[in-house]
Image (spheres, helix red, strand yellow):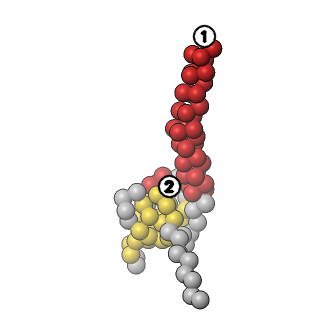
Amino acid sequence: MLPNLIVFGVAFAAIYFLMIRPQQQRQREAAALMTGLEPGDEVVLSSGIHGFITEVEAAVVWVEVAEGTELKVTKSSVMSKVTEPETDES
């Protein structure tokens, strides 16, 4: 009986640390990204389109993809912010 409980406990712990916990971390990161969007941020959409945010509304962002061309997209379609790579000019 006790060995069965130990195996069950180890299996649950493995599932938690390999599947549940990483998914929760990804959800927290996505939520932080959505709340941190501001005009002027360079972003990549889930479709692969790059652009700059011009306006943020409740569930929508306006992304300028070319001069004079803006797209109205849902916040959830923003995949990531583009960060400038750090250059070492020593």
Above/below status of 17 relative to 7: below
Q: Which mark is residue 12?
A: none
Q: CA distance from mark 2 to mark 1?
A: 51 Å
Q: Which residue is mark 1?
A: 1
- Where is residue 46 drawn, in percent x and y? 40, 57
Q: Nearer the viewer, mark 2 or mark 1?
A: 1
Q: Examine the rendered structure and indicate whether residue 48 appears above or below residue 1.
A: below
Residue found at x 59% / y 31%: 13
Farthest residue in the right direction?
2
Residue 81 position, x and y percent, is: 51, 65
The residue nearer to you, when weighing 46 against 60, is 46
* Residue 45 can be seen, yes or no: yes
Q: Which residue shows up at 47% across the image and 58% down it?
A: 78
* Relative horizontal placement of residue 67, taking residue 90 as reference (left or right): left
Residue placed most toward the observer, 3 or 81: 3
Give the quarter of the image for residue 41.
bottom right
The residue at the point 61 percent across, 60 percent down is 36
Residue at 54% in and 27% down: 11
The 10 Å Cα crowd at callout 2, few under 14, some 14 to 19, many 20 or more, is some
Report the front residue among 68 and 80: 80
Residue that numbered label 2 is attached to: 75
Q: Residues within 10 Å of mark 1 (few under 14, many from 20)?
A: few
User: Is the C-beta separation of discs 2 and 1 under 8 Å?
Assistant: no
Q: Is the N terminus in the top left, top right, bottom left or bottom right quadrant?
A: top right
Disc 2 residue type (three-letter): Lys
